[in-house]
Image: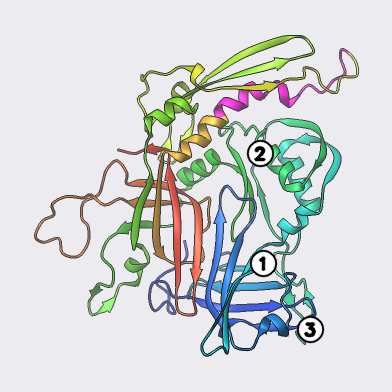
Amino acid sequence: MADTKKPGLQKAGSVDIVDLKIIGSTGKVIDLKDFLVELNVYEDIFSNTLYGDIVLSDSRNLIDFLPIIGEEYITVHFRTPSFEKRGDFIKKTFRVYRLSNRTIVRDNNTQLFTLHFASMELFFDMVLPVYKSFEGNVSEVALDVFNTYLKTPRNFDLSADEKKLETKTAETSFYVAETDNNIKFVSPGWTPLKIINWLASKAMPKEDTKAKDYLFFETTKSFYFISLEKIFKNSHDSKNIVDVYTYAASNLKEDKSPNIRREMALANSVEMVESNDYIKNYTNGYLINRLITLDVFNKKYELIDYDYTEDYKNNYHTSGEGKDAIPLFNLDGLKSPGSSVSFYPVNPRLFQNSTTDYFKDNISEKMKDIYGNRKSSLLGMTNVKLNVTVPGRTDIEVGRMLYFKFPGLGPKSPQDQTETTGFDKAYSGKYLITAVHHRVTSQEHVIMMEIVKDSLKD
């Protein structure tokens, strides 16, 4: 965790915009700091790339001067003051793809408009259909696809005369959690991102975790190909969380000076947007589901029922090990696999050359071990979901854990005039950060986070 006590951090939500430039298609470069109204950067654990937008107040007619035609680059580099370690800042080059909300203001001499941008990997993906066969360990194939088709420097720096882009910084990192199964397939024109997403749905983890809930996503720091259970286990084993957040009154002073450390860990607003829905859980396949595999060649079918309530204790959850994490459902509740039925075609001994020479790790024959577990594990991320607004800090990224003390509502003691002293035992605990919206102005950095949990601690 970054140091919030070092000099330089004057108040919670302070931000240092190191670099904010737009590079036009003609090579012109404009510093956007003086034009900035608001910068928004979005990351989501269910999104392969970053995206965002920037609102500008322009009295120099940049749209015509650059000109802005949708092929510009925007270099973004901002950090929380005192956050100096590698990875504690946000620095990336994006590509503009759209201009919107152009409005004339101030005596017809100034205009407001919004530029929308996204990671450059997204643009590479759109123009790279892949027609190729792949074979090997699932995580190794994912890494090969990324390195071959998507890998590009995360940041483009300007030359000394600021006339051209140069790649002076390290290339984008890609963290891959090793998988335990192999795969062989032919891409029928899929894009690289679609291939890696498909591989995530077919990935089986190593023995230290069991859930088949791999995801592929980008954060403000890196790309990740990792299972949710791996995230939970890593946080549990290392006791590593972003911070302990509380919902309480802000702008309080102690000893006649603001307590910055306290202010950084206060949520300004909290909204529970999803809570446990028993009808949904009984009908969408979260608690139990059925897969019917169809072997057209041999004219056979097989019914595979997966009961998450029986497997729950074997997996890690947001609250820790399964034996300690309290489920959000009754283990002995009514359930029927027939309430959620899916079908999957299988091809036994696919890529077979002879009775002894064939690909023995055929993924279609392993789906009975993957499908039900993956479905339940991912649906578990939809049960308890909070939206919280906190002071910005540039070391936060999706895929990390935090501890949130959900306020205990009801009567308080007369002495309780500063902050909430009671907490909801059921909903306080560890949460996974699944989405982050960074909103940056010249004066302030605010984060709107979506956090979820699949279990209780008490």
Q: Is residue 325 above or below residue 91?
A: above
Q: Distance between the Cα atoms at labels 3 and 1?
A: 24 Å
138 or 427, nearer to the observer: 427
Q: Residue 417 bears which disc, if any?
A: none
Q: Amino acid at mark 3?
A: Lys
Residue 412 placement (x, y as % from top left): 13, 54
Residue 135 placement (x, y as % from top left): 81, 34
Determine if residue 145 is in view.
yes
Q: Is residue 367 above or below residue 203?
A: above
- Secondary structure state at the residue bearing disc 3: loop
Identify the residue position indicated by label 1 in the image.
Answer: 98
Along the polypeptide, which appears first: circle 3 or circle 2?
3
Q: Quadrant of residue 363?
A: top right
Asked if the residues shown at circle 2 and circle 1 are in contact, with their CB atoms under 8 angstroms apart, the answer is no
- Secondary structure state at the residue bearing disc 2: helix
Q: Is residue 390 left or right of residue 315?
A: left
Q: Residue 163 bears which disc, if any?
A: 3
